[in-house]
Amino acid sequence: MLTYVLRRVGLGLTVLLATLVASFLLFFAGPADPAQAMCPEQRCSPERLTEIRENLGLDRPLAAQFTEYFGGLFVGRDFEFAGDVVHCSAPCLGMSFLTKRPVSEEIFSRFPATVLLALGTVVVLLAVGLTVGVITARARGSALDRLLIGGSQVFGAIPYYVVALVFALYATRIHGILPQAMPLSDGLPGFLAGLIAPCLLLGLVYSAGYARYTRSAMIETLATDYVRTARSKGLDEVTVVRSHALRAAIGPVVTILGLDVAALLSGTLVTEKIFEIDGIGKLSIDALARDDLPVIMGTVLVTAVLVVTLNLVVDIAYSFVDPRVRLS
Amino acid sequence: MIPDGRVDPPADVVLDVTDLSIAFPTDEGLLQAVSGLSFQARLGRTLAIVGESGSGKTVASMAVLGLHDPRRTRISGSIRLEGEEVVGAPEWMLQALRSTTAAMVFQDPLSALHPFHKVGRQIAEAYRAHHPVSKAVAQRRAVEMLDRVGIPNPHRRANQFPHEFSGGMRQRAMIALGLVNNPRLLIADEPTTALDVTVQAQILDLLGDLRREFGSAVILITHDLAVVAETADDLLVMYAGRAVEQGPARQVLGRPSHPYTEALLQSLPSPSADLGLLRTIPGNPPSLLAPPPGCAFHPRCVFSDRVGAPCRTEVPAWRAAPGESHRHVRCHLEDPVTAIDAGGLR
Ligand SMILES: Nc1ncnc2c1ncn2[C@@H]1O[C@H](COP(=O)(O)OP(=O)(O)OP(=O)(O)O)[C@@H](O)[C@H]1O
Ligand code: SF4
Ligand SMILES: [Mg+2]
């Protein structure tokens, strides 16, 4: 088990390093000129551009820039903006060209919103997805089954942003059934209330897929010999379904959930934009729109770390779900 | 056999099955797994059920515990467990009788035990479903059961998963699970298949001991006529979902009253040496979706020419075997025992 975990951690670190190099090459050797981004005015003189490039170290060889960036991740580094020296402490992901604040600060200040949004979404998607999946599996072939599964397919076929826009418009703006978004700085209760609508929406949209995975996995496990054994013991139906059939069906769901949580934590672009939530997703969109390369790269790296970590967590969690994989 | 106005069976009859039919609607049509099946199981006795794969042994046993999904199964007839009707009984009643009045040891213990639950817990859970005790007490009971079925180190074993058990150990654990609530009737579905001979003998001894100790009834489903000869008091032979003959095991094996039983015995490696595993008999097992008309065995029966048309058109009635008390047979031959004795090749 320990060697397995160590091997997986090693593999994860390799993936992260590769992502780091690839994104560095793509962004810093790419077409967008960071100096232009920092000096967007029309009258930006060539001298000013050169000065900015020097300050950012952009005139130095690529390898040197990479070494500095890489070193910054572990020990932090100092940046100079128009005479001021700004310290960027480890893990330093560079400085935002636009706000002149360390990228890591920008990202971590957005994290609470994104994490809470992801958490709320997971609660809704599991509650709805598992319930619908179990009900339809038990009533497979019935009118209820066809209605719920057919409905979820139709629902899933509509482009997400359309659903999101309509939902935001009707639920929070026109009818005001659910509270609108509020920044975290205005107090926690208002902020949390504002998350209800997007969590409900995202959770419901995701739950369609989970209902279908759960349904097909449950149809399989309900027909197994060990569920028949559970019934033959005289257990009540709730115990049979929950701790025998669902217990065995949950494995694949955990796997998919891990990847979806990684995606949710790396920011839900459309949702955060539409519901005006100041999270990682909104940060990436804004950074993209304004060529703020260090921020873009920072979010890419953080996403990579999340995906790699959650994959590892899922694999370890899976070994607790299925004792048979623990030995190998 | 007489559904209306039948008299109460003797008190030692724990299971009384009358005219049981079970069919599954499938995509290819109605699959008639069991038809017009009647038999009884008595306390302190072992009833063996033999028949080819697909003859309906497991389907019929599951019905005794009411384990078929009513939405996907058509069941008619009557199953009385200690006088209580099981067919059509409400779920709460079935839950109360499962594992206490009748318990089942399923075939293939690797798939019948939950792969994610520890063996001890699976047994304790069955005990707790019927006794208001704490988890610790139930766990102690599970360890005790594992010990009783001859599993060494029962404490350690109770905390292991089924995949950590050998085949014979899993079978023992399955039996421990079947016996944890001291059932009046234990149905053991092929408990010795796929085990080596020594373990087989141990498992059968175990079933015999427990039957003697508790005076319960045992139904032993098997493919192995040697096992029947050694352990069974009574024998029921099934073919294509129907009982074809029933009677005291020794009599049935000694002088079969049905051509199918005779064919089973003929297919054994050597009539004088030990009875071994069933070999296949000539011809194919019948389809249950479109069974042969008349007697389902007629395409493979060497006696059907002697009887003629009725074998191909009329299902023979389930009747007392002529000249043999306590025996029943389903065959058009007028005096099957004598006919087989005379016409057999033994
Ligand atoms: N739920 C079900 N739906 C449809 N068909 C079924 C179902 N359960 C069993 N059958 C069919 O009923 C027939 C009888 O099956 P059963 O399991 O009782 O045979 P068996 O005598 O126990 O055979 P074996 O010796 O192989 O265990 C088989 O053809 C089987 O495919
Ligand atoms: S009824 Fe006819 S076909 Fe069937 S077993 Fe008897 S003799 Fe053979
Ligand atoms: Mg079977």
Image (tube, rainbow, N blue to C red):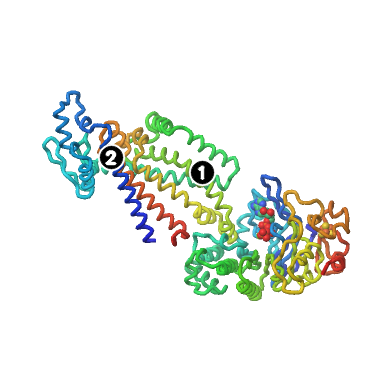
Q: Is mark 2 within 8 Å of ligand 1?
A: no
Residue toward you, A221 or B222: B222
Residue toward you, A65 or A79: A65
Q: What is the chain identity of the residue bearing mark 2?
A: A
Name the kind of residue labelled 1 in the image.
Answer: Arg
User: Image point 20% across, 32% down: which residue?
Assistant: A35
Residue B147: x and y in percent read: 54, 74
Q: Number of marks in the image?
A: 2
Residue A47 location, quadrant: top left
Alpha carbon of mark 2 to alpha carbon of mark 1: how far?
A: 41 Å
**Observer able to see residue B317:** no
Residue A242 circle label: none
Task: Please give the residue where the numbered disc 1 appears in the rendered image.
Answer: A212
**Observer able to see residue A281:** yes
Residue A25 circle label: 2
Name the kind of residue labelled 2 in the image.
Answer: Leu
